Image: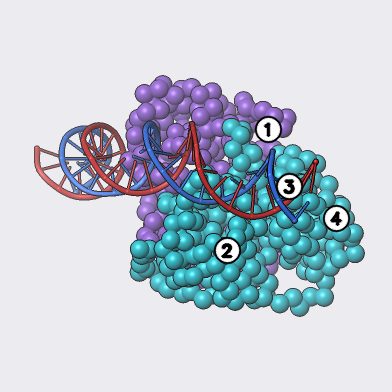
Chain colours: A cyan, B purple, C red, D blue
DNA sequence: CGCTGATTTGACAAGGTTCAAGCGAAGTGG
DNA sequence: CCACTTCGCTTGAACCTTGTCAAATCAGCG
């Protein structure tokens, strides 16, 4: 039985907790050579021996598992600054594939471990990232448990916005395909497409090409998503409305 | 924004990795007084200051969050041996309520932290539990992403069986209500009920009173669940088995 | 024995999946 | 540089599952 983790570091998180220690997790990787990975290629596969830990330098990746009936469950999308393959035991638990052209730096696991063992602050940072990942996992559960397609997609867009928004940016990138989105939120590709069309029809969002959308009515989007994806700009209480035309 | 964790220790895990260190996480709690909690009462609420860490001695609890639209998302059920409220920051992220009569031992968080700080093995154990919890979270995502009600419930039953099966016991306890189950797998109570009736009609399971069911046809159940909840009796592709016993 | 709350069951409608076809953009080869 | 192919995306229509509303049953308890 193997376990490993995607260590996440949300943008917000990073900003909120500036690093005082000179020695950061990232510093472990900065001398490692960069590996380039083409879209559609994997960094590693579910079941592989977990030999390396990676830090994402550039690009977006999808993390997924294939269920026994052939369906693909995307556990998350990760980007620059995040760690991949932090593992407690021997095997990777999921497959990680490049969505866009990707650059990563790899570090042999045993070195990663001995280094982080040596310095408590690193261990602490690792722990902290683990917590972030846990929180992210819970958010995804919330997302998956949402009933309607609109709620799910609204939640997904907010998640993506949160991940890349400098502030209240309205244009967000969706490097992944509709199929990726569908496998992430647990719907079919058709429903994703239809729902995007519908939201665009309501004026809540606007599709800008295939790989980005504009968030036109943030309030409506947050209301639709149920307000659960806490955003800095949003702070309401339990009495909430959800109108979408 | 606060983060904390339910640290899980699966039955299997405990058996597979015998403790060599004299000092275990549990040993931190064994001198603390036992608190009794009546069914329906909470150990703590989402948003409370995370003052204590708890170890469950007896009983079953539900861990949940209330979404802003009033829906309740049950993140998991936990039992004896598991930790509650391990927190990196100040507040509990979810509410924990007793399903059955429960006994827990509480330990002030700062003491828990300073103690585990002092001993690396404890930190290690904590890390390990965290990984278990992460794995559990992923399993729930798999469960939630399943399409049909039958798949979800079959998966749920297997999960429950795995959590309490001494061996290939076929009678499993379901201390929680149908509503709890519904909020866990993301369906309505009616659908849960209908689906149980249906599975019983197929001879796959049999309802024994309201709070336990007999697993009559394990193979059918595993097939229904998609075989993803790896069980000793089941190991396909990736060639790894994991004894349950 | 008569409450109260939990569960089951029924009928119906909404919404999502499925199957099928049309559209469009990106990339290839001439 | 353009036509062609391909793949991803959108759209349509029928079907099916699940959510909803409502009512009947059941279990536990005073």
Q: Residues within 10 Å of mark 2 (few under 14, many from 20)?
A: few
Badge 3 element: loop
Q: Nearer the viewer, mark 1 or mark 2?
A: 2
Mark 3 sits on what residue? A40
Q: Earlier in the sequence, mark 2 or mark 3?
A: 3
- Give a yes or no on whether discs 4 and 2 share a subunit: yes
Residue B69, label in figure: none
Return the chain for callout 3.
A
The mark tally for this picture is 4
Distance in Å between CA atoms under marks 1 and 2: 48 Å
Q: Nearer the viewer, mark 4 or mark 2?
A: 2
- Give the side of residue B200 with respect to residue A205, left or right: left
Badge 1 element: loop
Where's residue B21, x and y in %?
75, 49
Residue A208, label in figure: 2
Distance in Å between CA atoms under marks 3 and 4: 15 Å
Q: Nearer the viewer, mark 2 or mark 3?
A: 2
- Give a yes or no on whether discs 3 and 4 share a subunit: yes
Mark 4 sits on what residue? A35
Distance in Å between CA atoms under marks 4 and 2: 31 Å
Distance in Å between CA atoms under marks 4 and 1: 34 Å
Q: Nearer the viewer, mark 1 or mark 3?
A: 3
Distance in Å between CA atoms under marks 2 and 3: 23 Å
For the point 44% across and 66% down, the residue is: A203
Mark 1 sits on what residue? B242
């Amino acid at each position: 039985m193997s376990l490993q983790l995607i260590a996440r570091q949300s943008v917000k998180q990073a900003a909120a907790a500036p690093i005082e220690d000179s020695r950061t997790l990232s510093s472990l990787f900065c001398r490692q050579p960069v590996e380039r990975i083409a879209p559609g290629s994997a960094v590693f596969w579910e079941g592989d021996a977990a030999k390396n830990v990676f830090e994402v330098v550039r690009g977006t990746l999808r993390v997924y598992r294939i269920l026994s009936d052939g369906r693909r469950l995307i556990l998350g999308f990760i980007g620059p600054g995040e760690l991949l393959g932090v593992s407690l035991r021997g095997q990777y638990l999921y497959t990680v594939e490049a969505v866009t052209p990707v650059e990563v730096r790899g570090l042999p696991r045993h070195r990663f471990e001995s280094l982080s063992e040596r310095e408590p602050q690193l261990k602490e940072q690792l722990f902290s990232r683990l917590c972030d990942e846990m929180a992210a996992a819970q958010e995804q559960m919330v997302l998956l448990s949402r009933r309607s397609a609109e709620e799910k997609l609204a939640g997904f867009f907010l998640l993506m916005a949160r991940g890349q928004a400098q502030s209240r940016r309205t244009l967000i990138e969706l490097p992944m395909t509709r199929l990726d989105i569908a496998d992430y939120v647990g719907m079919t590709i058709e429903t994703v497409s239809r729902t995007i069309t519908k939201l665009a029809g309501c004026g809540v969002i606007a599709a800008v090409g295939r790989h980005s959308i504009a968030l036109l009515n943030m309030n409506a989007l947050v209301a639709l998503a149920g307000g659960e994806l806490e955003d800095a700009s949003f702070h309401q209480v339990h009495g909430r409305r959800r109108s979408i035309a």
